[in-house]
Amino acid sequence: MAIDAFLPIAKIVLQYPASARVLERYDIDYCCSGGRTLAATCETEGFSVDDVVAAIEDVLEAEEPKACDWDAMSMAALCDQINATHHDYTREAFVHLTPLVAKVLNVHGERHRELSDVQRLFEALAADLLPHLAKEERVLFPSIAAIEADPNHPMARCFAGPLAVMRSEHETVGKLLHDMRIVTRGYQPPPGACTSFRVLYAGLASLAADLHTHIHLENNVLFPRVEARLANAATPASHADV
Ligand SMILES: [Fe+2]
Ligand SMILES: [Fe+2]
């Protein structure tokens, strides 16, 4: 993917919302000064345009979905993949979007009352998701790797409860995303919205899309594999307990 440095910065950000993360790192204003080209801005600010373009392309490439044969992967590898692809992305999205939600609410909240609902839902998402990711990374995924290596591992006897909790937390996230979609009218910024407003809605839409893929992968690929593994390999004692 080649970024055209002679396009206005706002246009680059609107076409590739993830590029905003790089521009913020360089403290390049894509909102009020978004009409300047990237090349001209880099020249004025003393940045190498090649470095900035390369950094943007790296971020975009990391975001591109890679085709994966989930069934060919071990469960431990699948957990690693979920961590590297979705957990890291989710944390980064919260870091990037949190100040943007506050900024857009602060500037436009008076005229666009729905922005306080956007902030409330966004904060609820963060409050639910960040501990959820930590539980998966610290407890659930290592336990899955342990029972994959040894299906009669003692952890195998107490897996039904944690999986049910994870599924229930996924449902809560799904409801918040549903409400967010309604409040933002399908992530459509109002006519004439400024670049920050549009970048915020584009970022929220990307976060929602990634979360849907992420939860689908856990609910419909990973967890059923764990359950099948336990059902196939369980001893009578672990059958009784799981
Ligand atoms: Fe996860
Ligand atoms: Fe999860």
Image (spheres, rainbow, N blue to C red):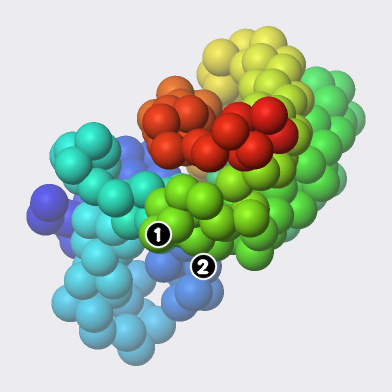
Toward the left, the furthest residue is 2
Residue 60 placement: quadrant: bottom left
Q: Position of residue 235 (x, y in %)?
A: 53, 39
Amino acid carrying mark 1 in the image: Ala
| Residue 48 shows up from this direction | yes
Badge 1 crowding class, 10 Å Cα cut-off, few under 14, some 14 to 19, many 20 or more, is few
Q: Residue at x 25, y 65 (%)?
A: 58
Amino acid carrying mark 2 in the image: Glu
Q: With 57 as the anchor, is 140 left or right in this view?
A: right
Quarter containing the C terminus:
top right
Give SS at disc 2: helix
N-term-proximal mark, 1 vs 2:
2
Q: With 219 as the anchor, is 101 left or right in this view?
A: right
Q: Nearer the viewer, residue 231 or 87?
A: 231
Q: Which residue is mark 1?
A: 149
Decide if ligand 1 comes within 8 Å of the CB at mark 1. no
Q: Which residue is mark 2?
A: 24
Give SS at disc 1: helix
Q: Position of residue 148 (x, y in %)?
A: 41, 52
Q: With 90 as the anchor, is 63 left or right in this view?
A: left
Q: Position of residue 16 (x, y in %)?
A: 33, 45
Toward the bottom, the furthest residue is 46
| Residue 204 shows up from this direction | no
